[in-house]
Image (cartoon, rainbow, N blue to C red):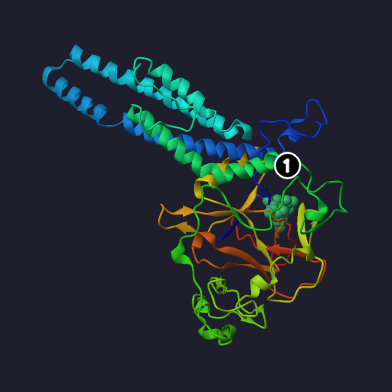
């Protein structure tokens, strides 16, 4: 199901939040809206996501220790005691106090730990690992009574032969695991950290940009030409890989096992889509024996033709997308690409985007991670495609390499012949849109 959630921003992750840009600041005190540009907001969100993710994981662990047996048993004893004697003994009170004080001590450790995680997230790349010093100080301070326990956590992590309180060791192990998970994301951040902030370079954009309506410049964006995963999203499961064993490059297309996945059979004729009520398209791929001349690779063959599209300023609906060349009915036009995120991240982002009222995205809600608690994945796309109640494009899900539903891709196909310089539109299919529809179609709902 395709729903709209306002504008179409997407940018690659970057990390300029806490260090000054290498470029000279244009003003000493930039106007708020300049500071809170989409990229900056994006960075903040990234950091926020990471902190929430990490602190949740650790707090869940730590809290489960405190809400555990000891407390439950103590409360049971108290209840029974009051029932029988109608009073609470000093013993019980002391026990309660000691439980509370141990909770407070442990809680303060968890708090420091979360602060420490904050340091990991916000640290510049050359700050690597000094986090362990900070945590070691806390640990030493807290456990100064245990003089025999020497903690040297500053070097490579936990020494194996030292006596370390179990809860601390577990917290460290958790932290290390989480940090390992963050590694790929971290190197991406590092790369971006060292990159200069530049406005989108026209030549690098797959589209041309045109505005003869007003003086607005295209919003500050970075483009991606392919999908990329948020670090919270797992790789597609291996069992979802598929491929065919056809000979002769799938010439007998109806019996190709990839096509068998498609509910409606082979939906193309001469490379053009002939029906849209097909569920999804399953293209042949690297697991098949065929090559690029196979008739079941229509999207792959025609992908990356975005140079024929132009982002332009419409007279009444902000930016839009149009085609600079005529498009034949049934042709594949372009793919929705962006960042694949999970439901938790998408919830967090929607809240922030809504509050800031300055970034937005399309939500394509179509996947469940059946293994792991039905996580819905969303694409955040970078297109400026406007809505029309009589859209000239139709959105069709397609698969290549994996049929893991979390990684389905979204293709736009022409529903009719489209002449050059025509705006390309899709039907958002939303009931109560937050905007008054100005599509101008005689079928406007
Ligand atoms: C995905 S964005 C499309 C790009 C947008 N025009 C821009 O300048 O960023 C969706 C937003 O465009 C505007 N929009 C799209 N289709 C529209 C329509 N038919 N009528 C009025 N506004 C529309 C709405 O503000 C909507 O929230």
| In front of the other: 394 or 26 | 26
Task: Look at the image and tell me in which quarter the N terminus lies.
Answer: bottom right
Q: Residue furthest top?
A: 90
| In front of the other: 427 or 247 | 247
Label 1, on which residue? 195
| In front of the other: 245 or 277 | 245
Q: Please report the residue visible at 62 percent of the width from the left and 35 percent of the height from the top.
A: 125
Residue 91 visible in the displayed image: yes
**264 lies left or right of 380:** left
Place of residue 204 in the rendered image (x, y in percent of width and height, measured from the top left): 78, 54
| In front of the other: 440 or 234 | 234
**334 lies left or right of 130:** right
Query: Relative to 94, does residue 180 appear above or below in the rendering?
Result: below
Q: Please report the residue visible at 53 percent of the width from the left and 28 percent of the height from the top.
A: 131
* SS at circle 1: loop
Q: Quadrant of residue 354?
A: top right
Query: Relative to 333, does residue 268 appear above or below in the rendering?
Result: below
Task: Look at the image and tell me in which quarter the C terminus lies.
Answer: bottom right
Place of residue 245 in the rendered image (x, y in percent of width and height, measured from the top left): 50, 80
**89 lies left or right of 420:** left
Place of residue 124 in the rendered image (x, y in percent of width and height, measured from the top left): 63, 33
Q: Quadrant of residue 94?
A: top left
Q: Please report the residue visible at 70 percent of the width from the left and 56 percent of the height from the top.
A: 383
Residue 124 visible in the displayed image: no
Query: Relative to 445, does residue 281 appear above or below in the rendering?
Result: below
Q: Please report the residue visible at 66 percent of the width from the left and 48 percent of the height from the top.
A: 12
């Amino acid at each position: 199901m395709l729903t709209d959630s306002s504008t179409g921003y997407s940018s690659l992750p970057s990390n300029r939040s806490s260090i000054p840009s290498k470029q000279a600041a244009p003003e000493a005190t930039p106007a708020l809206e300049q500071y809170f540009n989409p990229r900056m907001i994006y960075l903040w969100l990234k950091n926020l996501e990471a902190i929430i993710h990490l602190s949740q994981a650790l707090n869940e662990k730590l809290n489960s220790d405190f809400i555990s047996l000891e407390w439950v048993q103590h409360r049971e004893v108290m209840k029974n005691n009051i029932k029988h004697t109608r009073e609470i003994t000093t013993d019980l009170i002391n026990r309660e106090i000691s439980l509370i004080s141990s909770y407070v001590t442990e809680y303060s450790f968890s708090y420091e730990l979360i602060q420490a995680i904050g340091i990991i997230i916000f640290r510049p790349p050359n700050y690597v690992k000094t986090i362990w010093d900070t945590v070691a100080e806390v640990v030493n301070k807290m456990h100064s009574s245990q003089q025999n326990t020497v903690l040297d956590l500053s070097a490579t992590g936990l020494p194996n032969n030292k006596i370390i309180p179990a809860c601390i060791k577990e917290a460290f192990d958790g932290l290390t695991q989480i940090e390992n998970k963050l590694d790929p994301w971290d190197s991406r951040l590092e790369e971006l950290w060292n990159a200069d902030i530049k406005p989108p370079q026209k030549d690098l954009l797959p589209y041309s940009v045109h505005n003869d309506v007003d003086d607005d410049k295209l919003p500050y964006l970075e483009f991606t030409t392919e999908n990329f995963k948020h670090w919270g999203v797992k790789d597609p499961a291996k069992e979802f890989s598929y491929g065919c064993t056809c000979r002769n490059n799938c010439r007998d297309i109806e019996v190709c096992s990839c096509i068998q996945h498609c509910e409606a059979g082979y939906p193309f004729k001469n490379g053009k889509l002939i029906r849209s009520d097909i569920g999804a398209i399953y293209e042949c791929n690297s697991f098949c024996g065929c090559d690029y001349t196979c008739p079941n690779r229509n999207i792959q063959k025609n992908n990356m033709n975005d140079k024929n599209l132009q982002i332009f300023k419409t007279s009444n609906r902000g930016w839009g997308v149009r085609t600079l060349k005529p498009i034949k009915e049934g042709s594949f036009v372009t793919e929705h690409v962006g960042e694949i995120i999970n439901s938790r991240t998408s919830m967090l982002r929607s809240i922030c985007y809504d509050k800031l009222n300055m970034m937005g995205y399309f939500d394509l809600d179509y996947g469940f991670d059946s293994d792991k608690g039905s996580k819905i994945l969303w694409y955040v796309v970078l297109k400026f495609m406007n809505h029309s109640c009589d859209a000239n494009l139709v959105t069709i899900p397609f698969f290549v390499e994996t049929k893991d539903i979390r990684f389905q891709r979204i293709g736009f196909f022409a529903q009719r012949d489209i002449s050059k310089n025509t705006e390309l539109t899709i039907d958002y299919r939303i009931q109560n849109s937050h905007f008054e529809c100005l599509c101008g179609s005689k079928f406007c709902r």
